[in-house]
Image: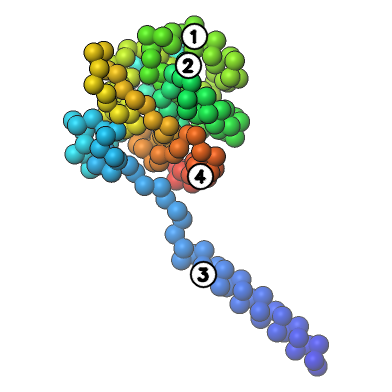
Amino acid sequence: MLKKYRLFAAIMISISTAAVLMFYYVLTPEKKLPIYQPSMVKFQLVDSTVQHIKRFHKIADYELINQNNQIVTNKTYDGKIYIADFFFTTCPGICPIMTDNMIKLQEEFINDNQVLLLSHTVTPEIDSVSVLKKYSMEKGVVDSKWNMVTGDKSQIYNLARKSYLVAEDIESSNLYDMIHTENFVLVDSRRRIRGFYDGTDSESMNQLIEDVYILKKEF
């Protein structure tokens, strides 16, 4: 009799636990990433012409050239989740760390065709196609996964300041000079910004990877 009671009690406990877990998962909404607008970002990193925008911000159309001398446009990333940053090949400071972390992201998503990478040089006058090709080969860039792009300096400046919201303007005798940040930008398949991450910090990279998987569920 005692054995039957214990068996009954064990079954009831199992059923109760399963019921509690089921209700927890039903009632707990899945995490969703914010949709960033220019008004939500530190004003120093946002061009004054877009600082007021609170809704419907998207990455603008662009046409640049990658390390293989191929045209890269916003259509290249249509329907894709991608991670973007700004760098230059001769940068002695944060850029090598950022590139190393982009390589880790490349390894994480190497077999995932839904996730791509995009790096923009902020010194296109130095980082020609041939320079980017040499740099990409040295770093182990997989061309099908990761575009390193150069092009018109004003276009890159406007992308950094008006679209990706990650560069600070500087007073200079040269037009379109800027200070790029260490930020990696997570962009969804609708060209909306879904996160900013410190491209020099390993914990931030772990969070970025986690957020990519969250975003994949959304789309």
Crowd tier of the residue under label 4, counting other residues whose Cα lies within 10 Å: few below 14, some 14–19, many 20 or above: few
Of 62 and 51, which appears nearest the observer? 51
Point 47% across, 25% down: residue:
93
Inter-mark Cα distance, 4 to 1:
32 Å
Q: Which of marks 4 and 1 is nearer the N terminus?
A: 1
Horizontal arrangement in the rendering, residue 52 relative to residue 198 (left or right): left
Inter-mark Cα distance, 2 to 4:
26 Å
Point 36% across, 37% down: residue:
193
Q: Do the residues labelled 2 and 3 touch (CB within 8 Å)?
A: no
Q: Do the residues labelled 1 and 2 touch (CB within 8 Å)?
A: yes
Crowd tier of the residue under label 1, counting other residues whose Cα lies within 10 Å: few below 14, some 14–19, many 20 or above: few
Q: Position of residue 64 (x, y in %)?
A: 38, 15
Horizontal arrangement in the rendering, residue 115 relative to residue 14 (left or right): left
Of 137 and 24, which appears nearest the observer? 137
Above or below for 1 versus 170: below
Q: What residue type is labelled 4?
A: Gln
Of 141 and 11, which appears nearest the observer? 141
Question: Circle 1 sits on which residue?
Answer: 131
Inter-mark Cα distance, 1 to 3:
57 Å
Point 46% across, 63% down: residue:
28
Crowd tier of the residue under label 3, counting other residues whose Cα lies within 10 Å: few below 14, some 14–19, many 20 or above: few
For mark 2, give the secondary structure.
loop
Question: Circle 3 sits on which residue?
Answer: 23
Question: Circle 2 sits on which residue?
Answer: 89
Q: What residue type is labelled 2?
A: Thr
Question: Circle 4 sits on which residue?
Answer: 207
For mark 4, give the secondary structure.
helix
Q: Can residue 197 be seen in this view?
A: yes
